[in-house]
Amino acid sequence: MEQWLYYLALLACPVMLIVMFWMMKGMMNYEKDCSSSSNADLEKSMHDLSEKNKQLTAEIENLKKNSR
């Protein structure tokens, strides 16, 4: 009986290692799918913020000119 427990413990380590590799592989594929759509969203947000920044900078310059 003790031999079976020894072999079971000996086999549990590589089996759990394989299971963890498989789970991590699945997580990486999920992140790749999510990141492609989020990159496009981030680029659009960045472009929108850049345009808003240009507008606000022009407005500040206009206010500075009018206050003199």
Image (cartoon, grey):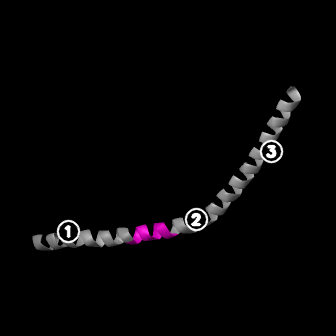
Q: Residues within 10 Å of mark 1 (few under 14, many from 20)?
A: few
Distance from Cα at disc 3 to Cα at disc 1 = 66 Å
Query: Closer to us: mark 3 or mark 1?
Result: 3
**Residue at coordinates 78% horizontally, 41% vertically from top-left?**
56
Q: Mark 1 points at which residue?
A: 9
Indicate whether residue 27 is drawn in magenta. yes
In the image, what residue type sits under mark 1?
Answer: Ala
**Residue at coordinates 35% horizontally, 71% vertically from top-left?**
19
Q: Tag 1, which secondary structure?
A: helix
Query: Closer to us: mark 1 or mark 2?
Result: 2
Dominant SS of magenta comes to: helix
Q: Residues within 10 Å of mark 3 (few under 14, many from 20)?
A: few
Give the residue furthest to the top.
Answer: 68
Task: Check the image and report above or below for 15 versus 67.
Answer: below
In the image, what residue type sits under mark 3?
Answer: Gln
Q: Give the range drawn in magenta.
A: 22-29
Q: Nearer the viewer, residue 11 or 21?
A: 21
Which of the 4 image quadrants contains residue 9? Answer: bottom left
Q: Mark 2 points at which residue?
A: 34
Residue 55 - label? 3
Task: Check the image and report above or below for 1 versus 45.
Answer: below
Tell me residue 25's x, y (percent).
43, 70
| Relative side of 63 to 23, left or right | right
